[in-house]
Image (spheres, helix red, strand yellow):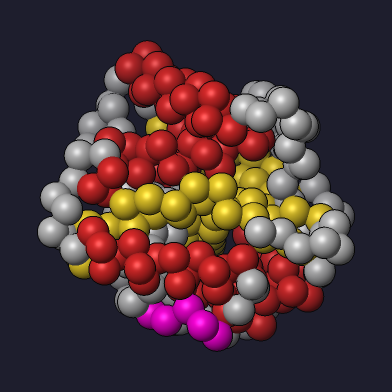
């Protein structure tokens, strides 16, 4: 089992406190999004991965879309911040843990991906210290019914086409929902960050993977791959929430940008 690495720092280490914090964030996101219309079910999501004090409201805007949805399989794709990585690493661990409980890893799916795709290897090293996947899990634990499983993918330097090929394999039966974990700009002042992040958000909505540079999103390789997959499958991308750490408790002279997006079946009338 891969134990929680950042409980008590990125999010509360106590199960009851963590559940209460996540539930409050989700309820606030529900109230912000409530317009009387029934939102379409997402095919995939993009969510930030900072501490909940900073990015929790933006992340909740993504996960609120999964409330009461019959989702039983999740793939979380996040960057490897601490271990240099080329390609995609899946773990050998049978479960990931948060204070709320354990989430089973689809070990056989991980092994099958490594057998089928040259860019995928079974390697626990990028996962041990990593927070980008872990911080998504308490949100999923609170919005999904019990019994769901997941596939953790640490995505290093990888071509968008390769990431899209892996997503095609994962999603061939239509029952896996991918989540890409990424923050946007890092350590700019608030005005500069907002300007850069708006440009990045427009590129994401336009599914323009080539317009997203390495300094625009720390999860750039997973994000580019998701957008390539979205174009391949004619999915629309909708911006749900755009913000920065200065919107909550961060220093406005040194901010990190956050965004939440939903990938949806195409309506043929645009997604903005």
- Where's residue 97, x and y in %? 43, 35
Answer yes or no: is residue 271 visible: yes
Residue 214 percent coordinates (x, y)? 38, 80
41 left or right of 16 in image: right
Quadrant assignment, res 105: top right
Q: 129 left or right of 151?
A: left
Indicate whether 230 appears above or below 175.
below
Judged left or right of residue 194, residue 220 is right
Q: Residue furthest top?
A: 16
Magenta segment: 210-214
Task: Count every numbered label the image shows and give the total.
Answer: 0
Q: Which of 176 and 108 is in front in this view?
A: 176
The residue at the point 80 percent across, 47 percent down is: 175
Q: Where is residue 54 in the image (x, y as percent from the top left)?
A: 29, 42
Q: Which residue is drawn at 56% across and 48% down?
A: 240
The quadrant in which the C terminus is found is: bottom right
Residue 154 seen in this snapshot = no
In percent of the image, x 45 and y 72: which residue is there?
199
Q: Where, quadrant-wise, is the N terminus in this rendering?
A: top left
Q: Residue at x 49, y 47 (%)?
A: 241
């Amino acid at each position: 089992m891969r134990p929680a690495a950042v409980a008590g720092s990125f999010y509360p280490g106590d199960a009851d406190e963590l559940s209460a914090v996540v539930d409050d964030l989700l309820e606030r996101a529900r109230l912000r999004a409530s317009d009387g219309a029934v939102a379409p079910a997402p095919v995939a999501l993009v969510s930030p991965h900072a501490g909940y004090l900073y990015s929790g409201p933006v992340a909740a805007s993504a996960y609120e879309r999964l409330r009461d949805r019959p989702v039983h399989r999740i793939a979380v794709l996040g960057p490897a911040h601490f271990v240099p990585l080329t390609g995609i690493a899946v773990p050998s661990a049978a479960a990931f843990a948060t204070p709320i409980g354990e989430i089973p890893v689809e070990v056989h799916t991980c092994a099958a991906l490594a057998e089928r795709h040259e860019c995928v290897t079974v390697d626990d090293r990028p996962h041990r210290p990593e927070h980008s996947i872990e911080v998504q899990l308490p949100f999923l634990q609170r919005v999904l019914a019990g019994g769901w499983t997941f596939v953790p993918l640490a995505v290093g330097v990888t071509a968008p086409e390769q990431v899209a090929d892996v997503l095609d394999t994962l999603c061939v039966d239509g029952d896996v929902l991918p989540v890409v974990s990424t923050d946007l700009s890092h350590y700019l002042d608030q005005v500069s960050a907002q300007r850069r992040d708006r440009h990045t958000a427009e590129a994401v909505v336009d599914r323009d993977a080539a317009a997203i540079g390495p300094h625009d999103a720390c999860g750039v390789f997973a994000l580019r791959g998701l957008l390539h997959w979205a174009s391949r499958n004619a999915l629309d991308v909708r911006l749900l929430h755009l913000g920065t750490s200065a919107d909550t408790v961060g220093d406005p002279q040194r901010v990190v940008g956050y965004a939440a997006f939903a990938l949806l079946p195409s309506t043929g009338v645009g997604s903005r």
